[in-house]
Amino acid sequence: MTAIYFNSWLEEYKHPFGAIQQLNTAHFSINVKSAGVEKVSLIMRKEDGERGFERLPMTAETDDFYKCSYTFDQGKGLYFYYFEVLCNGEATIYCGSNQGNGGIGVLSTAIEEVHPYQITCYETHDPAPDWYRNGVVYQIFPDRFFNGNLHREISHSKRNTFIYGTYEDEPLYLKDENDEIIRWDFFGGNLMGIIKKVPYLKSLGVTVLYLNPIFEAASNHRYDTGDYFAVDGILGDEETFEQLVSILHENDMRLILDGVFSHVGRNSRYFNHDGRYGKGSGAYQNIESPYYPWFSFSEYPEEYKSWWGIKDLPEINKDNTDFQQFIYGKDGVLDKWTSLGVDGWRLDVADELPDFFITGIRQRLNQYPEKVLIGEVWEDASKKISYDQRREYVFGNALHGVMNYPFRESILAYLDEKQTSQQLAEQLTILQENYPEAIFYNNLNNIGTHDTERILTLLDNNTTKLSFALGLMFMLPGVPTIYYGDEAGLTGGKDPANRKFFPWENQDQAIFENYQRWVRRRTENPILAQGGFYPFYTDELLGVLRCHKGQSALYLVNLTDKEVAVSIDNLHFTKALPIFESLLQELLKDVVIAEHSDCFIMKK
């Protein structure tokens, strides 16, 4: 009888934990108990590596442990491994991961059933600037936040649009028989409105603003860029933008802009379908236009490649060198706005941008001090495949981090009781294992954005569960992001209902104070931004432990309908306990968590 055990989350089996920098060495151990072991091997393969499968013999040591080491000398990328055990009189036994995830190994006698473990190998340690890593981000959909003009007049009327009669109106789209939007709707929020609400944002405690697109466009969301070098008139002008940047910096706040570089608007300066930028100008109007090579026409001018087939969004050919220079060359779009004091960029639909394009953007931003680059990626970015290519988002010198939608999905699944506390703790550990440490702490955490239903709506207006979601977002590694209005109790389903005007006259004060409380905890306790991360669980509870420089912070959630007295004997950590049991016992002494309740404990 042969007994085999391996666990990639425990350092006695794999050291160091998680991702590894290129040219560094990892040490592997596997426990094999058998009377007749012939050979134990580590099988390692770098994806697209020149050496293919490598078989490394493992040496027997005490207590039935077999060990070997591997140096990651084939460059950055993904490496995959499993174990092979040969025993007298038995079939070969393979030890791989559970469906490609980390943790406890799964045994099989059929090689085709083996799911290798993943190791992410990165080029450089790539922490984001401290202002970002230690910050709290607030996302604003500019048209829906506040109108700062005197008497609330509209700054610049647009054609083929309408303005809502009251701020309480429900957003809607006017569409034709082809389901195309024929009238864009606006509430009139603008940059001056953001300026005037800086005191409110300060009272909430946020330190970074992330704005949905502000450049000239036809729509209210402005992901159909019309002119990359102009502020949309309904939001204000460049002078107002500079005033916003200056006031934010005076208040120790930073600004991240949304970069939409995959596509432009059909009615943009560059495509100019309706001729608003002048007859004979733009790719649609003139085949001799300097912008014509940016686009891919199949039948000029009506048939062209567009983003996900949406005719309103002609897709840009990112291989075009003129467009590359236009965006990240000298005096290009990035230079224009970053030189005015913009502190970072969020790249819309990063999957649509080739790796070389993202690298070009990063290299340009590196010319400025203390800038951050975040990408919109909805999946585990360490292993994302887009257009049949493994993406290099997190391997170094590309994105600092991504929008952490996997965290959000796991939190919601747990709160909706579709995932147990054990499953959530393990899912969080999988992400921690796959991401380079710097990226893991750089990711932009969220429980809602302009692309998702409002968090309170998703939780059926259950404010207790909203509090849990908020607590988990702030306790997990990464930078927490508040979607405007969530802190006021704003509700709404899918787009456009998730983009209502901020309810300035009808805020939920209890929800606001809870957000404010968690922002204060994050700001006053650096451990929540910098501390080590150790998820754990019991049959009834989910727990998060953060540790840093002798300090500890604990957060526990009880979703059950019964009171739970916490005992360390019942706690299951996915990784080795990082503190002495006596200290944990002290932290949890006499802790009883009421039904449908949570608990935050800080030990300094």
Image (cartoon, rainbow, N blue to C red):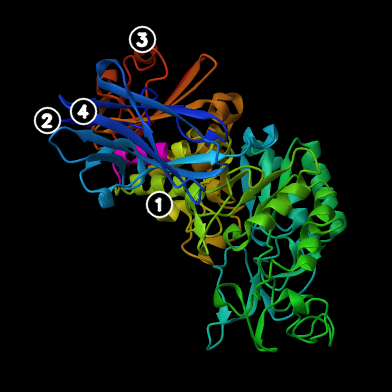
Left or right: 5 in relation to 358:
left
* Residue hosting label 1: 461
Q: Are marks 3 and 1 in contact (CB under 8 Å)?
A: no
Picture quadrant of residue 349: bottom right
- The residue shown at (68%, 42%) is 208
Amino acid beneath label 2: Met
Q: Secondary structure at mark 2?
A: loop
Amino acid beneath label 4: Val
Q: Are marks 3 and 2 in contact (CB under 8 Å)?
A: no
Residue 506 horizontal/vertical position (percent): 56, 52
Q: Is residue 26 visible?
A: yes
Q: Give the main secondary structure, helix, strand or loop, of the magenta stretch.
A: helix
Closer to the eye: label 3 or 1: 3
Q: Which mark is residue 1?
A: 2
Taking 352 as reference, is 125 above or below it?
above
* Residue hosting label 3: 582
Magenta-colored stretch includes residue 428:
yes
Earlier residue among tags 1 and 2? 2
Earlier residue among tags 4 and 3? 4
Q: Are marks 1 and 2 in contact (CB under 8 Å)?
A: no
Give the crowd class for mark 4: few <14, some 14-19, many >=20 residues within 10 Å: some
Earlier residue among tags 2 and 4? 2
Residue 438 horizontal/vertical position (percent): 58, 35
Earlier residue among tags 3 and 2? 2
How far apart marks 3 and 2 lie (CA) works out to 38 Å
Which region shows up in magenta? 419-430
Q: Which mark is residue 37?
A: 4
How far apart marks 4 and 3 lie (CA) works out to 40 Å
How far apart marks 4 and 1 lie (CA) works out to 59 Å
Closer to the eye: label 1 or 2: 2
How far apart marks 2 and 4 lie (CA) works out to 11 Å
Picture quadrant of residue 323: bottom right
